[in-house]
Image: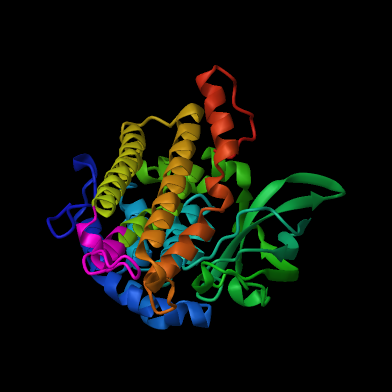
Amino acid sequence: MSSKNPAIGIPAFATSADGDRLLARLQELVPALRERGQAAEEAGRLPEATIDDLKTMDAFRAVVPTRYGGMELPFPYIPQIFRLLGRGCTSTAWCMGFLIYHNFQFAHFPADAQDEVWGGRGYTMAPGQVMPSGKAVAVDGGYRLSGRWGYATGILHGDWMLLSAPVEKDGETLPVQRFYVPVEEFEILDTWHVSGMKATGSKDVTLDDAFVPAHRTITVEALRERTGPGLAVNDRPLWRVPLLTFMVFGAVGPMVGAAEAMLELVGDSLKTKIGAYSGDKQQGLMSQRMRVARLRMELAATIGLWEQTIARIWAEVTAGTTPSRETRIEARMVVSHVAAKCAAIVEELAIAAGSRGTYLASPVQRFRRDAGSLATHALFEYDHVANLFGGTLLDVELPKDAMI
């Protein structure tokens, strides 16, 4: 990576000039994202200025095939996009990161679908909900889709929405499928009343008997196991990264960025902070110096593990190897560990910041609430993932339907 951003670890065998330029511009955007944070939270959505900034720097083309004018960046760049946005605003990183990342899923869909979503402006801004819900009924030419889906992050800014539903055909239940549907066909419900991640606008949505053409769907298993029809044309290394592996490393990026931001912000405040009752200058306290030193090392080690694992996966797929199931569950374990460590670092720093960090105008309290909220996400569930990963270390076979 360029000297402008030496803390970003892109392995030498994965460098991209387009990727370097994008990361540098994202870093430049960090101050603006912090300034916009309170207004975004109060509005319950991201400001159009942020969307425009990301469009101007072509961020939404990061995970689009080059034949559609995309960057098709090496995998190690994608989590760093989430991370850098996270240095400015956790909610922005989560929401925009996934609108950028979800282009990856469309590469698995049929060629007709790819032409539809990328053939115009060359990228899509597609929110995506993970857990299956609702019901799809097979009909001539496609499906009739109805139901309610929660946590539709990015729905206020999107064009298509990705969602999953079980399928019925002639009274028989078929495997769960992944669909994409125009955002304007959904009813958006006013459900996002939360204590953290407010600016993501992750509202519930409903569909009532919407028709979905057959080319707008593939099975969830095809996505997870890399057997989608689109991979016949998207056969370069980026598309060989397993879907869940691709997703989770990006998903934890906002928490990495939040922890880095907190070290910066709280560290700066401790340089001038004076204890209200003790009168001690915090800069001169050995305990505060030791805290900052320890947390800096803990975060550096955590980021090192995260980046090292990303580089190992990229090395495998560029060598033509598909990561094993054991590698994939280890990757999920790494991400759960990173999420837990970053959340703990953010929380300890928030306490060290003192009461001034609780003012609404302070980004400290927003990073604290957003990171604490994001740490509860099912993608980062520690016990379940550790149980599966620990089992592999003791020669226990992974369940066939494990989310890896």
Q: Residue furthest right?
A: 171
Q: Is residue 250 magenta?
A: no
Residue 77 pos. (x, y %):
30, 52
- Scheme of colours in the image: rainbow
Quarter-wise, where is residue 12 in the image? top left
At 53% across and 23% down in the image, what residue appears? 392
Q: Residue furthest top?
A: 395
Image quadrant where one finds the C terminus: top right
Q: Residue furthest front?
A: 278
Residue 380 pos. (x, y %):
52, 47
At 55% across and 66% down in the image, what residue appears? 153
Q: Is residue 355 above or below residue 313?
A: below
At 55% across and 17% down in the image, what residue appears? 395
Quarter-wise, where is residue 311 in the image? top left
Tell me if residue 193 can be seen: yes
Q: Is residue 400 above or below residue 187?
A: above
In front of the other: 378 or 174 = 378
At 23% across and 59% down in the image, what residue appears? 18
Please tell me how many numbered marks the rendered image carries: 0
In front of the other: 340 or 396 = 340
Q: Residue furthest left?
A: 3
Please indicate whether residue 10 sits to the left or right of residue 132 in the image.
left
Please indicate whether residue 131 sits to the left or right of residue 370 in the image.
right
Tell me if residue 119 can be seen: no
Q: Is residue 340 above or below residue 133?
A: above
In front of the other: 381 or 96 = 381
Residue 48 pos. (x, y %):
41, 82
Which contiguous range is marked in magenta? 263-285
Residue 400 pos. (x, y %):
64, 30
Quarter-wise, where is residue 288 in the image? bottom left
